[in-house]
Amino acid sequence: MSPKLKILCIEDNPVNWRLVQRLLGQVGYDMYWAEEGLQGYQMALELKPALVLLDINLPGLSGFEVAMKLRQNPDLNGIPIVALTAKTMKSDRETALVAGCDGYISKPIDPFQFTTQVEAYLGGQREKVEQSREGSVLRQFSQQVVEHLEARLKEAQDANRKLQEAQEALEIRNRNLSRLLALSQSIVAEHDPRSLLSRIIARAQEDLGLRALQAFRVQADGGYFEGLRWTPVGIEAAPSIRGDHAALQRLKGVMDQGPIFGERLLQSPFWDTGLELGLWTQPSESMLLPMSHRQSEGELWGFWALSREPGRPFQPFEVELISLIGGLAQVSMRNAELIFSLNESSRALASSYESVESAYMEVHQAQAALGQRERQALLGDLFQKLTDWLQTPVAVLQSESVVLDQVEPGQTEWKRSLVQIRQSVAQIDSVVKALTRRAGRRETARPEWIDLGALLIQELELISMESQLGEGRLKLDFHAPEAKIFGIYGDFSETIGHLVRHALGGPTPSPSIVVRTIVAPDLFRIEIEDEGGPILPETIEQAFEPFSGLHEEPVLGVRQPGSGLPSCRQLMSTYKAALDLRNQGEGTCLSLALPLGGA
């Protein structure tokens, strides 16, 4: 099967292209389209089509110019070129043939004959100019080419002139913007509104060659507008204008339309009002620049009145520059007033800081004294509870001592009493150690054999004594026989404290806290369940990581893991213990699994 013949249509009218595509595509030709001449020439170089359908009236390169370029290229010279033209004059058709076309098809296209016409040119049909008319047609074509080139040259000259004018305007605009930027940088440190406005007015007069410039701004109460004006001898105060002046009320209606100048100003009521108020004189080239309030919509913040010698109308770039300078003045004065207000507030704050600091010190001292009295009262209650707690082991020691005095060594009663005494001594010793830790005294950290069940009960009782757990909130569920581990007492007591504080740390108090112990072969497990609310899963994953909450903002009502949990992992890592935290029911469950047998 032979490949489809390629036909390139260079046509700027999409409607004509769709008709050509439909008529030729349905009989098996491979169709391509270019919208303008230079694009069509490039596509012809790439495609090497079997035929080119060329519209004569193309934007950019004309159809005649495209035909000449195709004929001048040796690789494309043999391709048939058929002109599509709406021109019906014989001379127009002959011009197309002279330019390099092999024939022409008139527009509008006849759909019943178009396919036959194209196939005839593909089959070798060629049109030629009569020899007797060839000279005159060439001269006519040359004249058309010259006229076309002259028109293109004029267009290029006009475009170049406009480009130069735009470049000059851009250079002027850039210079003005550079000067405006330099002005804004020079007034950054100026915080006095009057001095600031004076400097901006003087620069505007210099840059624009003004004969007069007056800048007004409404006062805080809106009762009147006060301003400054430039004179050859310097900046001076301008006469104030009442805020209810009819002209200012009318000015509110046009303040968002930009500067008013030229013929528009002369034909407006503001011209005569400006003459009455002395804003400008006649004759002059004048301008009125209204400025709206940035904080109060629909309110007039101020206005500028400018004028210079007649015959020097304001240019567009000057109007833009005036608007920018006025905006700079408005923003700068607002900032200067805010800075002045802040400075005043800072001075007032500084003057009262010493008295506040003195009052704070007095309150702090009173609070410290009160805290000391409360601490003493709490310690008194704590030691009273501990005294009550120690009465039982002390009584046992006393009674057993009496028994020992009455029996001979080796008897059963003596041995039983000795066991009772040792247990009581151990109980008192553990209480003394706990009191030492609670009082802030540090023992030398030395390992010893620790009864985990007894230690857990003792720590929970001490926490209850310190009122961290209310009556009935703590529930014990112990299923563990005696389990001992060789380690440092303080590691385990501190870990248990952190675990219990997590259970107490929910956003809502947990109604109950269940502490469960389980002993498996060579393993001691502690589980602490609470109902203080669940924790987000992504937060649970980092609960035991150091510094996990350092850069996190707490969310109100959302529970966080206890702050001491990372310390638990660090303390228990020596004992190869496993820590786990998970959500369970209405709260969480903390699990500590300790391998028995020592570190």
Image (cartoon, rainbow, N blue to C red):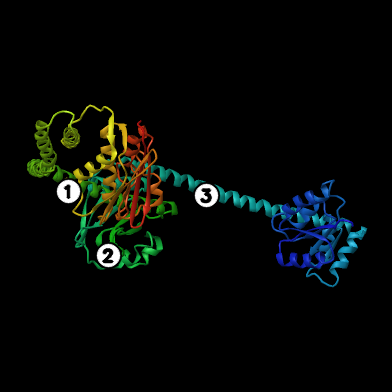
Residue wearing tag 3: 166
Label 3 vs 1, first from the N-terminus: 3
Q: Please give the label number shown on residue 248.
A: 2
Choose between 12 and 462: the one closer to the eye: 462
Q: Residue at x 24, y 49 (%)?
A: 338
Cα–Cα span, label 1 and label 2: 74 Å
Choose between 196 and 457: the one closer to the eye: 457
For the C terminus, give its image quadrant. top left
Q: Residue at x 20, y 30 (%)?
A: 442
The location of residue 562, given as percent across then percent down, is 30, 45
* Mark 3 Cα shell of 10 Å, populated few (<14), some (14-19), many (≥20): few
Query: Mark 3 or mark 1: which is in front?
Result: 1
For the N terminus, give its image quadrant. bottom right
The quarter holding residue 137 reads bottom right
Query: Mark 1 or mark 2: which is in front?
Result: 1
- Asked if residue 430 shows in the view, the reply is no
Residue wearing tag 1: 467
Cα–Cα span, label 3 and label 2: 37 Å
The quarter holding residue 343 reads top left
The location of residue 394, given as percent across then percent down, is 11, 38
**Tag 2: residue type?**
Leu
Label 1 vs 2, first from the N-terminus: 2
Q: Residue at x 19, y 43 (%)?
A: 462
Q: Residue at x 72, y 59 (%)?
A: 58
Query: What secondary structure is found at the residue carrying circle 2?
Result: helix
**Tag 3: residue type?**
Ala
